[in-house]
Amino acid sequence: MTTTNTRHMTTQGGFNTQILPWRLYQKAKKLTWDPATIDYSREKADWDSREDGMKRLVARLATTFMIGEEAVTLDIVPLLRAISDEGRIEESLFLTTFLGDEAKHAEFFRTWFDIIEDGSSEKMDLEALLTDSQRRVFDDELPHAMGRLDNDRSPEAFLDASLTYNHFVEGVLAMTGYYTWDKMFSMQDVFPGMRAGLEMVQRDERRHLAYGTYLCRRIVAEHPETWPFVEKRMAELRELGLKFVDDIGAAIFDEFRANAGPGVDAAQFEALAQGIMAEFTNYGQDLLTRRTEAIAVARTTSDIEGGLEEDE
Ligand SMILES: [Fe+2]
Ligand SMILES: [Fe+2]
């Protein structure tokens, strides 16, 4: 007696090589990199020559990157499981590279801290640098939205996972973080190892984001009635994002205020601080609007891959 097992695409004519997840999977293999081969030789000297206030600022930003990467490594698993259970083999293949990417990102940032702390008698208390909003996003919102897929495979549950993970954490928070780092250090020839790693990380993240847009568009196209949920969740995430940026800004400027010498003009400092915060807040808000618009494309066209090539 013969049986048909539709679970195995490899015996049913093979993979669908025409869809975006397949192309992203191919690209991920081609563009693979290893955090262990980054040249970290200048990082320690650059770190040691920064003054204390700058060290705290650098540590705060790098810690945000690092815990974000650790969180997304741990929290991607329910999505991979849920997509696999639906038999979407090409998406599953891509997600295996996605998980591997996040693991490397987490390794990269921890390696960087190991290098700059090498030989220090006292290790920095990085946990103490985390703000309430960071804990809320990485310890509550993200694991909750992803873990929901363990018991709920509704279109809203998939959207909740992708909006929170891909569009908010990767597409808004991480991108705003890279922008901030770039603004601070692109004019200075410092931390070349961090810069090289960040470039590799961002290249990977563009693929992750392209997949997140594909995923949300696929669901919205199949279930147009879910659009109000997308708008509602994005509005919640906008509030969360504003608080996230505000909290980091407040922590950084509080430290500068506390350590500023007598020569600093307080009013001038506050104006400068507010201007800087407004720039980063606007940047993040713009990104969030663009993410929503990218998903909304699925409401008016059946071509859910349109315009995603440039994100890859
Ligand atoms: Fe990452
Ligand atoms: Fe990512």
Image: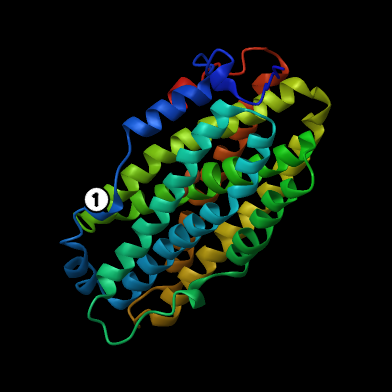
- Image vertical order of residue 121 relative to residue 63, above or below: below
- Image vertical order of residue 105 relative to residue 60, above or below: above
Give how far across and how far down residue 8 sits, in percent. Answer: 60, 24
Q: Quadrant of residue 44?
A: bottom left
**Left or right of residue 82, residue 224 in this image:** right
Q: Residue furthest front?
A: 1
The residue at the point 76 percent across, 41 percent down is 157
Q: Amino acid at mark 1?
A: Met
* Residue 175 appears in the picture as rendered: no
From the viewer's side, name the closer residue of 279 and 175: 175
* Residue 146 appears in the picture as rendered: yes
Neighbourhood count class around disc 1 (C-alpha, 10 Å): few under 14, some 14–19, many 20 upward: few
The residue at the point 59 percent across, 53 percent down is 75
> Where, quadrant-wise, is the N terminus in this rendering?
top right
From the viewer's side, name the closer residue of 248 and 201: 201
Q: Quadrant of residue 47?
A: bottom left
Give how far across and how far down residue 217 sits, in percent. Answer: 66, 25
- Image vertical order of residue 224 relative to residue 162, above or below: above
Give how far across and how far down residue 206 sits, in percent. Answer: 45, 35
> Where, quadrant-wise, is the C terminus in this rendering?
top left
Under tag 1, what secondary structure? loop
Give how far across and how far down residue 283 sits, in percent. Answer: 51, 43
The residue at the point 38 percent across, 45 percent down is 201
Name the residue carrying label 1.
187
- Image vertical order of residue 140 relative to residue 98, above or below: below
From the viewer's side, name the closer residue of 293 and 151: 151
